[in-house]
Amino acid sequence: MTSLVKKAIEFLSKKKEGLVELSYQPRVLKETKDQEKICSLTRELINAQFQLCDDELTNRLWEEVANLNIDPERIINLMYKCDSNDDFAAMVDKDSKYLESSFEMK
């Protein structure tokens, strides 16, 4: 039996009540990377729009938001409702609360 098959059997044997326990959290990792990107874009937009007053850069950043299929309301929420856009933890907290409230509305 190959090591890949052994690993697959071990993985499937961890199944409990329809749930599979994973030793890693790919969804959490993806969400964290998404939040990092969203926070970064938000900071760039704040800089371009409010500090530099650069319409061209601002438009390019909003196009990037659209190309990445990011909800613009999510960015706007961070731009205007986050106390400190320099504090990554505060931004993640505000973003998480926004996501929770948007799921509750649906």
Image (cartoon, grey):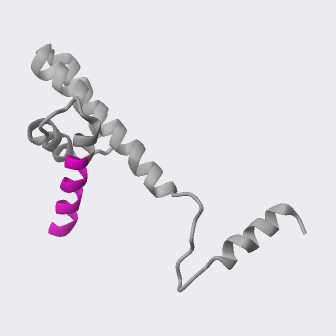
Res. 45 in view? yes
Is residue 25 shown above or below 32?
below
Magenta stretch encompasses residue 95: yes
**How far across and down, in percent of the image, does residue 75 sit?**
20, 40
Magenta segment, prevailing SS (helix, strand or loop): helix
* Rendered residue at 23%/56% (across/down): 99
Q: Which residues are magenta?
A: 93-106
* Residue 2 part of the magenta-drawn span: no
Q: Is residue 18 above or below residue 41?
A: below
Residue 25 located left or right of residue 66? right
Which residue shows up at 42% across the image and 42% down it? 33
Residue placed most toward the observer, 24 or 66: 24
Residue at the spot 20% in from the left edge and 55% down from the top edge = 97
Q: Is residue 106 visible?
A: no
Q: Position of residue 45 (x, y in %)?
A: 20, 27
* Quadrant in which the C terminus appears: bottom left
In this view of the protein, which residue sits in the foreground, 74 or 84? 84
| Quadrant of the rendered image containing residue 41 | top left
> Quick one: 50 or 95, which is closer to the camera?
95
